[in-house]
Image (spheres, rainbow, N blue to C red):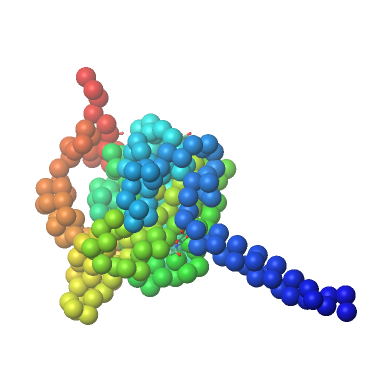
Amino acid sequence: MVFRGTWWLPLALVALTCALQCALVLGDADFESVRVLMTKDSSGKAGDPKEKYWHESTFHPHLDGRFIDHDLKYEDQQTNLTSLMQSYLSTMADLGAETWIIHGTLMGWWWNRKIMPWDSDVDVHVSADTMHFLASYYNMTIHTCRTEHAPRGKNYMLEVNPKWVNNSPEDSLNTIDARWIDMLSGVFIDITAVHRTPKRPGMMFCKDDHHYREADLFPLRDSVFEDRPVKIPYNYAELLQQEYGRVSLTRTRFAGHTFNSTSQTWTRNSKS
Ligand SMILES: *[C@@H]1O[C@H](CO)[C@@H](O)[C@H](O)[C@H]1NC(C)=O
Ligand SMILES: *[C@@H]1O[C@H](CO)[C@@H](O)[C@H](O)[C@H]1NC(C)=O
Ligand SMILES: *[C@@H]1O[C@H](CO)[C@@H](O)[C@H](O)[C@H]1NC(C)=O
């Protein structure tokens, strides 16, 4: 009889706690909810349109301003991108999530199986099914990975844009479906889902309005990238030529770098 009149109080408390937790889960991944070292948010959030999910930093389009407040030095960018790529490939392999490299990242593979030193980001694809899987079970998960350049381990976060489910290229502010983000240096991988469309059998498209023949992507080939197993599109040479022109596959001077065919590396031209 002690609880007469107030028997509902514990229930109400449970309901309230649930509501608060759900509110947290559904909230925007804003600076306060994810920050590690920074005390000030350097994401371009304030200036971005409201419908845009990602807020790149105010000082560099390929750095996440929630995690860093300055540009990276040339060498630091390279080692951080290499670790980023390695951590992503290992983690996706562990999760059983199929992914393959594309755009400038695939071009880097073509030359020497490495990210090109002037590239400041990494691009990968996943299927729509895989994106659904990542969004359902791994959104906002943090993965600690050890790599050659980060032997003591670094934290990487997988974040999925809730607008990925709308695959219309007209939603042009949200063409990046997910990101794999280095929570210390702010570098990230753009992850884009590839969709089939009943309107054009045999063709596939991404929200960023790139179109592919299914036969140019699949079956994926096995290779190595940044010393890790990787998948690449079946017709990689054709895709690279379409995107960057035939000459891009043979030109050994580009973006202030020269390809040394002995060492198989791009080296930065000296300023003199
Ligand atoms: C990443 O950049 C930081 C500087 O921001 C540097 O100290 C570090 O060595 C770089 N490389 C890795 C893998 O963390
Ligand atoms: C992922 O989590 C963030 C932060 O809670 C949230 O804003 C976003 O909507 C979530 N994405 C999906 C696909 O649910
Ligand atoms: C190319 O790399 C080789 C081997 O590392 C080196 O000996 C050579 O000096 C390099 N060539 C140029 C032009 O830098």
Quarter of the C terminus within the rendering = top left
**247, 159: nearer the viewer:** 159
Task: Name the residue at the front extreme.
Answer: 5
Can the viewer see residue 205 in this picture?
Answer: yes
Q: Is residue 79 left or right of residue 255?
A: right
Looking at the picture, does residue 267 appear above or below residue 97? Answer: above
Looking at the picture, does residue 50 appear above or below residue 267? Answer: below
- Percent across and percent down for residue 215 are 21, 72
Q: Residue at image x 24%, y 63%? A: 169
Q: Residue at image x 65%, y 70%? A: 15
Task: Name the residue at the top extreme.
Answer: 272
Quarter of the N terminus within the rendering = bottom right
How many numbered marks are there? 0
- Percent across and percent down for residue 107 are 24, 50
**134, 46: nearer the viewer:** 46
Residue 152 appears in which quarter of the rendering? top right
Task: Name the residue at the right extreme.
Answer: 1
Q: Residue at image x 47%, y 56%? A: 28
**152, 161: nearer the viewer:** 161
Q: Is residue 210 left or right of residue 69?
A: left
Residue 240 appears in which quarter of the rendering? bottom left
Looking at the picture, does residue 49 appear above or below residue 6? Answer: above
Residue 24 appears in which quarter of the rendering? bottom right
Q: Is residue 138 left or right of residue 164?
A: right
Task: Name the residue at the left extreme.
Answer: 246
Can the viewer see residue 185 in this picture?
Answer: no
- Percent across and percent down for residue 62 are 34, 44
Q: Residue at image x 35%, y 33%? A: 74
- Percent across and percent down for residue 136 are 47, 69
